[in-house]
């Protein structure tokens, strides 16, 4: 494969990864296995994927401005929580054995996919301002557990980016049921963009970066990140949950099979 052909292929992979990242939190369904197939080690495939998906993160956040307009309070509370987790997770990436990644990731992704496909009875629709004041439920325990969950997903995102988006989307869908899928997806995009940004800063300090892989993926992710929220806006929320859940299970199974080979 020539360098030009490889670059074009990586751009296409980046577009698909950007769409799945912005629309479903499943960039890893495309980018991570593709990079592994190109011969990159699991840790470096994770680092490369994280660098490239930062692009789709920022473009998807801009494209999700409509959904975020009335949910800024929740968004600004989430950012420092997931950032703190991401810092811890990114440092753990270089402190723990690489074998742990291969065994942990499929379990987490598979569980997230199953939870997302289970029907959740929505609360009665409320005005946006009321929804914001009751973010993550009414009880203090519910809110506390929700923020703990977001912090843990932040750690996981910094530690191993594969599947973190779908885990965050699943958590928001379960604990923030008063919101539409599009709103929860937009909040997920903000959270994942924050964690990916912090993670790649630490990665750049700690390890070498495969820029000849990152740059074409980066370009593709920008385009895909713009398209993703637009797609979500025009599809039923329940359908998106099922699609994301199935995609998560496919990714989990493919990673299990790869680990067994």
Image: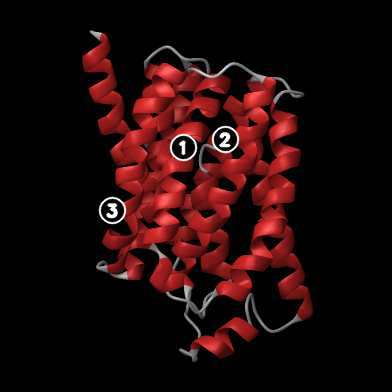
Q: Position of residue 205 (x, y in %)?
A: 68, 24
- Residue contact between numbered discs 2 and 1, judged by CB atoms under 8 Å: yes
| The label number, if any, that marks residue 252 in the structure image | 1
- Image-quadrant location for residue 72: bottom right
Where, quadrant-wise, is the N terminus in this rendering?
top left
C-alpha span from label 2 to label 3: 27 Å
Looking at the image, is mark 2 or mark 3 earlier in the sequence?
2
| The label number, if any, that marks residue 105 in the structure image | 2
Residue identifier under label 3:
227
Q: Residue at x 34, y 60 (%)?
A: 229
Answer above or below: position of 257 versus 128.
Answer: above
Q: Residue at x 30, y 44 (%)?
A: 223
Question: Viewer-proximal residue, 3 or 120?
Answer: 3
**Is any part of residue 181 visible from this angle?**
no
Secondary structure beneath disc 3? helix
Secondary structure beneath disc 2? helix
Answer above or below: position of 137 versus 151.
Answer: below
Q: Position of residue 11 (x, y in %)?
A: 28, 30
Q: Is residue 58 left or right of residue 83?
A: left
Q: Residues within 10 Å of mark 1 (few under 14, many from 20)?
A: many
Q: Position of residue 6 (x, y in %)?
A: 27, 16
Q: Is residue 114 left or right of residue 234?
A: right
- Image-quadrant location for residue 175: bottom right
C-alpha span from label 1 to label 3: 25 Å
Looking at the image, is mark 2 or mark 1 earlier in the sequence?
2
């Amino acid at each position: 494969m020539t360098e030009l052909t490889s670059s074009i292929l990586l751009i296409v992979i980046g577009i698909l990864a950007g769409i799945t990242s912005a629309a479903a939190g499943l960039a890893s369904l495309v980018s991570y296995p593709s990079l592994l197939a190109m011969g990159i080690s699991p840790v470096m495939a994770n680092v490369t994927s994280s660098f490239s998906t930062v692009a789709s993160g920022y473009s998807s956040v801009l494209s999700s401005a409509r959904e975020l307009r009335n949910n800024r309070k929740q968004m600004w509370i989430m950012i420092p929580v997931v950032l703190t987790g991401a810092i811890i997770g990114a440092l753990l990436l270089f402190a723990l054995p690489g074998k742990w990644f291969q065994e942990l990731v499929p379990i987490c992704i598979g569980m997230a996919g199953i939870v997302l496909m289970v029907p959740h009875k929505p609360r009665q629709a409320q005005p946006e301002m009321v929804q914001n004041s009751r973010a993550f439920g009414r009880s203090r325990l519910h809110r506390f557990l929700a923020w703990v969950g977001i912090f843990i997903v932040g750690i996981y995102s910094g530690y191993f980016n594969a599947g973190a988006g779908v885990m965050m989307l699943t958590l928001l869908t379960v604990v923030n049921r008063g919101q539409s899928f599009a709103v929860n997806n937009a909040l997920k995009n903000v959270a994942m963009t924050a964690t990916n940004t912090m993670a790649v800063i630490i990665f750049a300090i700690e390890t070498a970066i495969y820029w000849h892989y990152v740059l074409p993926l980066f370009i593709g992710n920008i385009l895909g990140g713009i398209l993703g929220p637009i797609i979500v806006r025009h599809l039923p929320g329940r359908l998106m949950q099922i699609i994301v859940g199935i995609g998560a299970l496919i990714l989990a199974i493919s990673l299990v099979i790869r680990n067994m080979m």
